[in-house]
Image (tube, coloured by chain):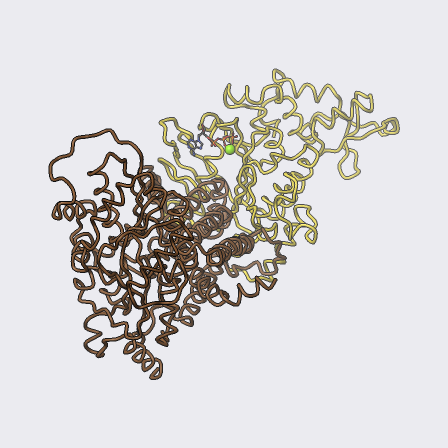
Chain colours: A brown, B yellow
Amino acid sequence: MSALHTFLANYGAVIIDETLRHIYLTVVAVVVACLFAIPVGVALAHTKRQVVISVVLGSAGVLQTIPGLAMLAIIVMIFASMKLPTIGVPPALIALIFYAILPVLRNTYTGIKSVDTGLVDVGMGVGYTRWQILTKIELPLAMPVIMAGIRIATVWTIGTATLCALIGAGGLGDLILKGLRSISFDYLAAGTVPAALLALVMDGLLAFAELYFTPGRIRRRRKDYSAGTSLTWRGAIAIVAVLGAAFGLMLRNGFLGTSRRHYVAAFDSEFLVRQDGFPGLARLYQLHLHTRPLQMDSGLLYQAIKQKSVDIIDGFATDGRIKAYHLVALKDNLHFFPPYYAAPLVRESTLRRYPVVKTLLDRLSNRISDTTMRSMNYAVDNQGMPAAKVARKFLLLNHLIPSHVIPQRRRIGKIVIGGKSFTEQAVLGQIMAQLIADNTNLRVVTHLTLGGTIICFNALKSGDIDIYPEYTGTGLVDILKRKVIENPEEVYAIDRRVFRQRYHLLWLKPFGFNNTYTITVRGTTATKQHLTTISDLAHLIDEQNHTS
Amino acid sequence: MITFDKVSKSYTNNELAVNMVSMEIAAGELFVLLGTSGSGKTTLLRMINRLEDPTSGVITVGGRSVMEQDPVALRRNIGYSVQGTRLFPHMTIGANIAITPSLLGWDNERLVHRINELLEMVGLEPDQYIHRYPSELSGGQNQRVGVARALAADPPVILMDEPFGAIDPITRDRLQDEFLQLQAHLKKTVVFVTHDVFEAFKLGDRIAILNEGMVQQVDTPEMIASVPASKFVEDFLGHNRILLLMQNRQVGELQEEYEPLVPTAAAGFTATIDVKDSLATALEKFRSANMRRLPVISESQMLGLLSVDTVTNHLIPGDCPAEGALK
Ligand SMILES: Nc1ncnc2c1ncn2[C@@H]1O[C@H](COP(=O)(O)OP(=O)(O)OP(=O)(O)O)[C@@H](O)[C@H]1O
Ligand SMILES: [Mg+2]
């Protein structure tokens, strides 16, 4: 009981907020899909051209087979090529609308088709016009089937909408992603349970609406036999009411794009939940953002700030895009972030079995400077080079692998290299993998798109992977939950000692660069507002809040 | 009121569902289309309110070609009870009946009054049935509502496609009687489709017999039964013909052959025959009274004696008297 109480105290407000967003996404997507699919379905049911029917239903069917994630990706790409905003609600809505179309379209078509043609005939006989036949006979009789389609579309949309958190559209997916990134059951529950309940409630509401909209379902003692309010009018009024309510809700909660007097921040899901991430940062710097920061995949953050959809993001010191996009990393003047020197984190047992791995990885010690890492990240992120190729170039340049073609050899044993799902980890993972593969007979397997710190760390502990690149500050604050320490050597020493004692994991020698988190704004913003430190930003935000 | 001039209709295939039909239906007439299944009765009927358009030929209603009239307005002025009586399952009985008049803009008070009137007319207690849905009525009750719906807007022309098809013989007989009474004072122009010879002969002022889309004969029931126009009509009536003749001729037609009445003998008769009785009824009375002669009365006045032989002589075609004597 008290557990539930604390849970609700901690997450109640967020759950309500994200649920409202989720409802908004779902309702708007389904209503828009219906406004398109029902008329098209009706038209299809009345056309005699079989070709048109096959083409339309077929292409709607193909649309449906595209996986949700891929659909989102395709929409984002199309939006990017059209110079439209690639993050936030609009692209998410488009993807959801595409998804909701098929069930409604197909059910409208079959619903109307299955209306007894004899009744349509009688309808003409009693003197109905074509339109009256549609609204008074065909639609009412097809209503249960159409409503079934709308219910399917709604339940699907509620599920698919969780993916929209990846592109900063918010919703309950935000909480689920946070749960995944931090292996936090609380977050997972806070996202999943409301989503499931939402699906049940919406389905129930629609079942009730079906009862209401289908004449003859509820016994009404009819008193007025003259034309009266027809189904179409009632339907139109209901749709307008629902849309109006949804928009009103959104306006009240400021979801429809905050006024640009206030800065909007967006962070990746890991930064939002980490000890050394946003919560601690906001506390230390007294950062009172007007709206809760958006959550989106780290790859999309730079795109978002460049397009001015957001104003503040979390960046990495070694990210090539900071320079490329004319962004400025603000100075951490209160020393919130610990040093983040990257180093291979390895299982002790792996090194005992294959001592050569340590010898090889030690060769990387201090070989990668901040500049080197940044240019490699830049090559992948901005020049579209594969991480494997960038890694190979680096290894060849430093004579770490033989330059001649290595003949196929029989491989024995197995080393699994992991990495978190962002560019730098992919490059580091590839460097380690190729270094080992080209200098030994070991078989090397890579898993370089694991969800985040906690997922990588758990995989390493359980032996699913043998090595992954980790950052000293992350080890100290995020994994060991210690206080921030400024001295890099001290951090490394603590990490080494505790990880070895507690987990039998070894920190090898650091690669050389420090990839600290940075709070990043656009260069133009920084110049205009005279921002150099995070404290400056905090003051500016306070000013904005006061003037409004 | 309704005329057909060389009307033909073919659906997608080349066969003619209706083949060069020309005929006229007078105002106030109960006109029956009779024929076997697939003979084109429904097609002919549906061309009147433009649910089908003729392939060639002209149909007029009220003097104007239907092709020149707005189909929706035309249909609102023609009552139509469809074959198999399909009521709208999502509307109450009352709402089903009210459709056409409400489309014509009647106010609610008038509509409610009309629904009640019609339900009573077709023998369904209004209070009990008005709010029910069609699925809560029997098939026969549904058919009666179908008839009521066709009559609802009080249209001058009514098309009825086998309206009493799914009803048991006793109820059907009653409904037919009620319908005849109704028609006697409503005087609508009714086009009535049936494949039941007895129904056609009982109801029809005139009957058109159809075969393979072609009209074989258009005439009064008596003429069709006594003088079939073709071998087909003869075969179609078959062994029912003698029955039909007996049912469609009245004793009064044999007036000239009554035997004079001997007043003293009157006391011995146990039954009497009415001049309006059909020959069939007369024969039945001879049989049940077990007598060869019975007195004929008209409004309790004795006209003479009729003998069995006179009746049978008339029914044997070979002995048929000259045309004039029949009418
Ligand atoms: N919609 C249609 N499409 C094609 N052919 C049709 C259509 N309706 C009727 N026919 C054909 O036209 C012919 C006449 O049909 P119609 O329905 O007029 O017959 P009917 O005399 O009413 O028969 P029944 O007593 O069985 O109702 C039949 O051969 C039938 O197959
Ligand atoms: Mg028919």
Q: Nearer the viewer, residue A223 or A73?
A: A73
Q: How many marks?
A: 0
* B24 relative to A400 in the view: left or right: right
- Residue A139 coordinates in the image, percent (x, y): 47, 50
- Residue B124 coordinates in the image, percent (x, y): 68, 47
Can residue B103 be seen here? The reply is no
Can residue A332 be seen here? The reply is yes
Q: Residue at x 36, y 35 (%)?
A: B55
- Residue A298 coordinates in the image, percent (x, y): 30, 58
* Image height of A339 relative to A409, above or below: below
Q: Residue at x 52, y 68 (%)?
A: A9
Q: Nearer the viewer, residue B181 or A348?
A: A348
* A289 relative to A309 in the view: left or right: right
Which quarter shows the C terminus of chain B?
Answer: top right
Farthest residue in the top direction? B318
Q: Nearer the viewer, residue A430 or A241?
A: A430
Q: Nearer the viewer, residue A34 or A480?
A: A480
- Residue B111 coordinates in the image, percent (x, y): 59, 58
Quarter of the image where one finds residue A353: top left
* Image height of A174 relative to A48, above or below: below
* A191 relative to A256 in the view: left or right: right
Q: Residue at x 58, y 30 (%)?
A: B221
Quarter of the image where one finds residue A337: bottom left
